[in-house]
Image (cartoon, rainbow, N blue to C red):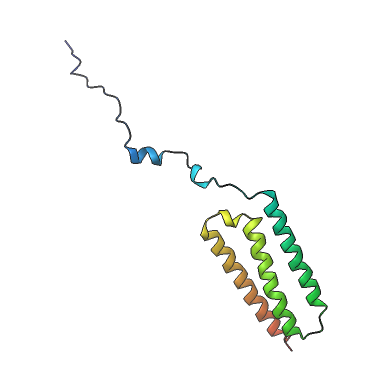
Amino acid sequence: MSTDTDTDVSEPPEPAAADAQAVEDPHATHERTHPPDSEYIKVFLLLAAITAAEVATYYLDVGTGLLLGLLIPMMIAKFAIVAMFFMHLRFDSKVFTGAFVFGIVLASGVYIVALSTFQLWG
């Protein structure tokens, strides 16, 4: 004869509270609200103003070194604004932001070395 105690079929244990939190939706931590359209319009106007300043700077009668000294920071600022807002780096991990900052610093350094090689500073 078999009794209920011979076959111990029990239900699986309930997960602990910590395990229950780990099982939650993995996308829940990544949900962030995106800025309203008005903020993107402000970004557009800022980028347009920087572009206008770049064009106006080109028509100034200054030396090549000063011209590049004015244009390169504006280029970096526009790159940063586009990356932050339109590539959504503001909402992503700091690792991605660091990768883009490293890229722009490296590209600027290579550009400056290339310009120095061709003696465009004088």
Compared across the picture, whether 60 is left or right of 113 comes to: right
Q: Is residue 103 above or below residue 66?
A: above
Residue 19 at x, y percent in the picture = 35, 39
Q: How many marks?
A: 0
Residue shown at the point (60%, 72%) measured from the top left: 105
Tell which of 114 and 25 is nearer to you: 25
Compared across the picture, whether 84 is left or right of 115 comes to: left
Report which quarter residue 115 is drawn in: bottom right
Q: Is residue 68 above or below residue 49?
A: below
Residue 96 at x, y percent in the picture = 55, 59
In this view, the residue farthest toward the bottom is 122
Residue shown at the point (81%, 80%) measured from the top left: 60
Residue 83 at x, y percent in the picture = 64, 60
Q: Quadrant of the N terminus?
A: top left
Residue shown at the point (22%, 19%) measured from the top left: 7
Q: Quadrant of the C terminus?
A: bottom right
Q: Is residue 55 above or below residue 28?
A: below
Tell which of 71 and 115 is nearer to you: 71
Compared across the picture, whether 5 is left or right of 111 comes to: left
In this view, the residue farthest toward the left is 1
Residue 107 at x, y percent in the picture = 64, 72
Residue shown at the point (56%, 61%) measured from the top left: 97
